[in-house]
Image (cartoon, rainbow, N blue to C red):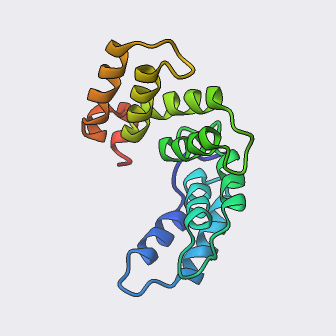
């Protein structure tokens, strides 16, 4: 069974990470268990740990991008945005701006404001898509809105 969002293990890992003195080993073990159970949010959390590194995990962008690629069909806008950036710049994947644009679009439609900003840039530069200042301005305006105002209703209870 593939879960789109959280398991108890994921929620516990988040709680541990929010503590004044987090136990990253325990949080990591919970995230790994949640990932095994199909929790895509846990997979994304682990991906960000590898992409950025932390006190427990040494930065390993290749592994982080590999985890992001496993989330390509998910509805986790932050994961889609991060994967789009990888394709946009060719970080540990073959550079593919059409794929990046598609991922930015999906993430933007799911409420990711940074993706809205990227789409504005694509349209204002005529990059991959035809130059269209009206669309560029519309996406720029959307990028400045609160995430809660542009997310699909089912996501609002998760934010």
Q: Is residue 106 above or below residue 1?
A: above
Q: Position of residue 131 (x, y in %)?
A: 45, 13
Give the vertical position of 26 relative to 41 (above or below): below
Q: Position of residue 137 (x, y in %)?
A: 30, 21
Q: Residue furthest bottom?
A: 21
Would residue 36 be seen by someone viewing this image from the given angle?
Answer: no
Q: Quadrant of residue 47?
A: bottom right
Q: Residue furthest front?
A: 125
Q: Residue at x 66, y 67 (%)?
A: 33
Residue at image location 60% in from the left, 38% down from the top = 88
8 or 68, nearer to the observer: 68
Q: State which quadrant residue 29 falls in.
A: bottom right
Please name whichever residue, 144 or 7, is drawn nearer the observer in this view of the structure: 144
Instruction: Tell me: 90 left or right of 145.
Output: right
Examine the rendered structure and indicate whether residue 92 appears above or below residue 15. Answer: above
Q: Residue at x 38, y 34 (%)?
A: 117
């Amino acid at each position: 069974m593939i879960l789109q969002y959280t398991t108890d293990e994921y929620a516990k890992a988040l709680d541990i990470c929010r503590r004044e003195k987090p136990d990253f080993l325990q949080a990591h073990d919970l995230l790994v268990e949640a990932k095994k159970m199909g929790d895509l949010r846990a997979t994304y959390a682990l991906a960000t740990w590898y992409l950025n590194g932390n006190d427990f995990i040494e930065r390993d962008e290749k592994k982080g991008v590999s985890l992001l690629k496993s989330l390509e069909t998910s509805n986790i806008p932050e994961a889609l945005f991060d994967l789009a950036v990888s394709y946009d710049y060719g970080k540990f994947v073959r550079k593919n701006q059409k794929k990046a644009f598609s991922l930015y679009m999906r993430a933007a439609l799911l409420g990711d404001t940074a993706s809205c900003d990227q789409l504005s840039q694509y349209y204002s530069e005529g990059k991959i898509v035809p130059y269209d200042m009206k669309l560029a301005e519309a996406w720029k305006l959307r990028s400045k809105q609160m995430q809660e105002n542009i997310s699909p209703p089912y996501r609002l209870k998760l934010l």
